Image (tube, helix red, strand yellow):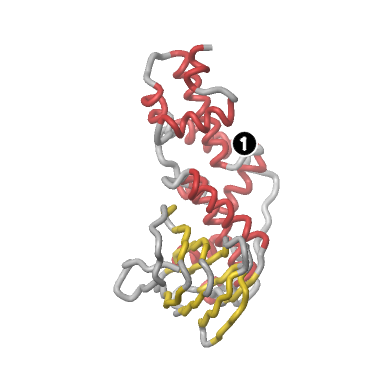
Amino acid sequence: MEKTALSQDQMNVLTSQVSPILTGEHIRVQHLRNPPGEGPYHQEGNHTMFMSLAPRPIPYLQTQDGQTHTGLYRKGDLLITPANTPLFVRWEGDENCLQIQLTAQFLKSVARENLQNDCDRLELMPTFQTRDVHLEAIATMLFSELQQNPSGNQLYVDSLANILAVNLLRQHATTKPKLPIYEGGLPQRQLMQILDYIDAHLDQNLKLENLAQLLDMSQFHFSRLFKQSIGLAPHQYLTQQRVERAKQLLKQTDQSIVDIALHCGFNSHSHLSKKFRQITGATPKSYRAG
């Protein structure tokens, strides 16, 4: 588990291989692969979740919050280390895990926006070798995004960060908070406001926070109500509309495909081609020629 120079009082365990890092405003994801070893880990301002990706179980010894745990971590097993909680780890096999850091400030913000309890007293519990199907699914999606698109789809990464934060609070906090339930989708006026905003900013790196703030709503509930309204998550709708804009430009202009990609909010020709093929079944070049 990793060592970085985030600040003088932040220390991570040595990592043997440099790997891509997926970052958002409040989240940092890295794939760690290490030979057998040991070391300390400490994050002053970030909560950390580790998920084992190793194909065969690995023996670990871990110490945090005055407790020591030994066990064979299987693929999907999780370790949760709250911010400012020193952790010591020793592993005996070739380590292969995903490290996800969420800022403590972001978790508090999500709690205030979404939960009905005394949010300032909510704290995450240090947790050894646990299984959580929801957290595992979110971590797997983040890992997939890290592998396929390290530069990150900001709206998608923001959405996953919010869902991750809510599930950590629901299942791994010192108290079990209740989440208010909103159903029925967004009112038509609010939905059109969001759709018009997305249409006007397709070429920009849209953030979930920006969209939710337009309606004075938490990011988690905005995502939920948006999907109820049109059947797509915000990041899915954004990608769909970018491809639609690209289709128009391919047929109606002689701009290069690279220029069209950038104009529509894709970060490269290949990024446009990949999403275009996923949605239309054709490449931009063959669509233009058709």
In the rendered image, residue 75, in percent from the top left (x then y), is placed at 62, 63
Dot 1 falls on a residue whose secondary structure is helix
Residue, x 54% and y 41% (percent of image)?
235
Say if residue 260 shows up in the picture.
yes
Quarter of the figure that contains the N terminus:
bottom left
Where residue 57 sits, quadrant-wise, is: bottom right
Looking at the image, the residue that sits furthest to the bottom is 66
Question: From what the image shows, is residue 162 above or below residue 208?
Answer: below
Residue, x 49% and y 77% (percent of image)?
89
Which residue carries the number 1 mark? 188
In the rendered image, residue 25, in percent from the top left (x then y), is placed at 41, 55
Quarter of the figure that contains the C terminus:
top right
Residue, x 53% and y 79% (percent of image)?
62
Residue density around tag 1, few if under 14, some if 14–19, many if 20 or more, within 10 Å: few
The one of 64 and 58 positioned closer to us in this rendering: 58
Question: From what the image shows, is residue 67 above or below residue 84?
Answer: below
The one of 127 and 60 positioned closer to us in this rendering: 60
Residue, x 46% and y 62% (percent of image)?
32
In the rendered image, residue 121, in percent from the top left (x then y), is placed at 53, 76
Question: From what the image shows, is residue 270 above or below residue 43?
Answer: above
Say if residue 177 shows up in the picture.
no
The one of 182 and 19 positioned closer to us in this rendering: 19
In the rendered image, residue 237, in percent from the top left (x then y), is placed at 56, 36
Amino acid tagged 1: Gln
Q: From the viewer's perspective, is 55 left or right of 48?
A: right
